[in-house]
Amino acid sequence: MSEFMYYMIGGVPLLLCSIFSFVVVARMLRHRETVLGLLTAALTLAFGVGAIVALLLGWKNRTAWNLTKIMPIFAACVLVWLALNVLGYGVWNPLFYERLERSQRQAVQIESSPIEGFENLRPKSMNGP
């Protein structure tokens, strides 16, 4: 799999969770929950766990903050994001980078291997003794 696909698999759910968490933070601030909103935004930016906090607080107040359509989608994104992290496709998971390095090594091996039928076109110094 290409490097771009690894980043897409791991990054899209993370990006969606961040967007939805900031929508919930905006609703918190609109309903005068300033401390919770700023704390959730800071946790999202600093550690990434603010999305889970926003999910819990947003789900609890979904009717009061008019988030009834957004919250099921947000919950699905968080579950997909957590599942991808457990499976090793999350951007913050060390297994993600191991897979990415393995993919890059395979790409280098493919590029450096000779194409069948064209071995004789190499200069004599590259063919060896």
Image: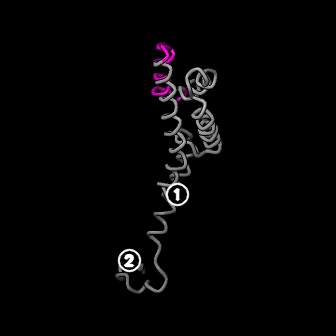
Residue 58, percent from left and from top: 58, 24
Residue 112, percent from left and from top: 44, 70
Q: Residues within 10 Å of mark 1 (few under 14, many from 20)?
A: some
Color scheme of the displayed model: one colour
Residue 34 falls inside the magenta stretch: yes
Instruction: Pick whichever, 64 or 95, lies toward us.
Output: 64
Q: Amino acid at mark 2?
A: Met
Residue 104's place in the image compared with 37, above or below, is: below
Instruction: Pick whichever, 17 or 2, lies toward us.
Output: 17
Residue 107, percent from left and from top: 48, 63
Q: Residues within 10 Å of mark 2 (few under 14, many from 20)?
A: few
Secondary structure state at the residue bearing disc 1? helix
Q: Amino acid at mark 1?
A: Ser
**Residue pictured at 50% horizontal, 20% vertical:** 28
Residue 59, percent from left and from top: 62, 25
Q: CA distance from mark 1 to mark 2?
A: 26 Å
Q: Which residue is mark 1?
A: 103
**Residue pictured at 56% horizontal, 51% vertical:** 99
Q: Which mark is residue 59?
A: none
Instruction: Pick whichever, 3 or 51, lies toward us.
Output: 51
Residue 82 shown left or right of residue 39 in the figure: right
Q: Which residue is mark 2?
A: 126
Stretch of the chain drawn in magenta: 31-49
Q: Of discs 1 and 2, which sits in the foreground?
A: 1
Residue 47 falls inside the magenta stretch: yes
